[in-house]
Image (cartoon, rainbow, N blue to C red):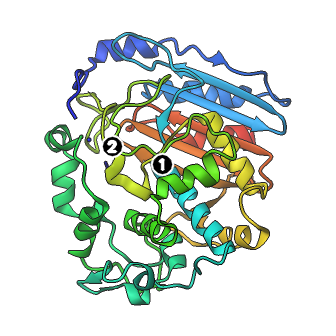
Amino acid sequence: MNRRAFTTALTAATAVALSVALTAPAVAAGPPAAPGGHDRTERAVRAAVADGVPGVTVTVRRGHGTWAATAGVGDLRTGAPRSARDHYRIASITKTFVATVVLQLEAEGRLSLDDTVEHWLPGAVRGNGHDGGRITIRQLLNHTSGVFDYLEDPDFQQTYMTPDGFMKHRFDEAAPEDMLAVAMRNRPYFEPGASFAYSNTNYLLAARVIEKATGNDYGDEIDLRIIAPLHLTSTSVPTTRVTLPGPSSRGYSKLSRETTGRTYDVTELNARMAYGSGQMVSSSADLTRFYSALLGGRLLPAEQLKKMRTTVPSSRETSRYGLGLVDRRLSCGVHVWGHDGGIYGSNSDAVTTGNGRHSLAVNFNGDWSGSTDAIIEAEFCGR
């Protein structure tokens, strides 16, 4: 999904080193606990490490209290533990930030969700059946545009998603127009509005709309409108920075669909290629603060928040997709709102209740095993 010279290229962790790291996944408590206890959540965190995740960091915000825990390791070579304050790449959770800015701009009368992509980005979506004049901003945000996802292009996958390709191109500084060109050489999935298909190209385009509407980089608008007002001190939209701010852990990947085989250290990479679909860095504490504020009505007027929470059927039976926001129905009937995100070496999830009063954010520093769903179920359903 997502590249400058670096000193530590990769760490191939042996099975022995991995088993040693995971035999005793100490869970470290963070800030003072919120009332109610989190024993089941803690057990689910331990289970993720036992399943093969190198390390986990999780934060829960409930009312005015917070609870945080870590398990496993942040560095397979040294055995250093994960930190509750870890910075990590949040990947597609970026989409909620982008959608929030678009809706703020609508509230200010600077654009309409019914505006076409062609209106804001003339000629950008054209070719092989794509027609930006028939696609609205709303359809970008809820993935009903039909625009092809550039991550699904076979040549792109061969270039960037194989072990050799990733190692060669991890620091590439591809422009969003390059990624858009990849999408446009493929046919759309369907006619605009006819169905749902998750496409990272939609949010590349949404970020470009923000830039056309404001004259600023979309990341600067996120900083101005969300990061600074909420004091999200661990959150950023890096440009071409390939390292993570400290504290942070190493990120690990198999660089394949297999869960066995060689483990690669993929910590350093240039996520600019993901752009508005997944470029950001944050922490679990910041993500719980963000989603609590968003669903609590602090970032959007009621009309725009209602639009954000207006959903369409998604590819998962238990969830529906709004505007950069997923409504997930848990096994106990509780609904939580948020987004998940995966990028090389990082798997994250952040959710909150409909009133924003109970939030959770979790990150794995490995991308091949474990279940964030199980941790969310444990916290909100007690199972």
Label 2 with label 1: CB-CB less than 8 Å: no
Q: Secondary structure at mark 1?
A: strand
Which of the 4 image quarters holds residue 188? bottom left
Can you name the residue that lies furthest to the bottom here? Answer: 134
The amino acid beneath tag 1 is Gly
The correct choice, above or below, for 104 with respect to 86 in the image is below
Q: Secondary structure at mark 2?
A: loop
Asked whether, in this view, residue 269 is left or right of residue 90, the answer is: left
> Residue beneath label 1, please?
341
Where does the image place residue 103, in percent across and percent down from the top left?
Answer: 63, 69
The correct choice, above or below, for 98 with respect to 263 in the image is below
How far is disc 2 from disc 1 in space, using C-alphas? Answer: 20 Å
Residue depicted at 23% across the width and 70% down the height: 181
Asked whether, in this view, residue 167 is left or right of residue 257, the answer is: left
Q: Of tags 2 and 1, which is closer to the observer?
A: 2
Q: Residues within 10 Å of mark 2 (few under 14, many from 20)?
A: some
Which badge, 2 or 1, is on the more N-terminal residue? 2
Asked whether, in this view, residue 73 is left or right of residue 176, the answer is: right
Where does the image place residue 150, in percent across and percent down from the top left?
Answer: 29, 64
The amino acid beneath tag 2 is Thr
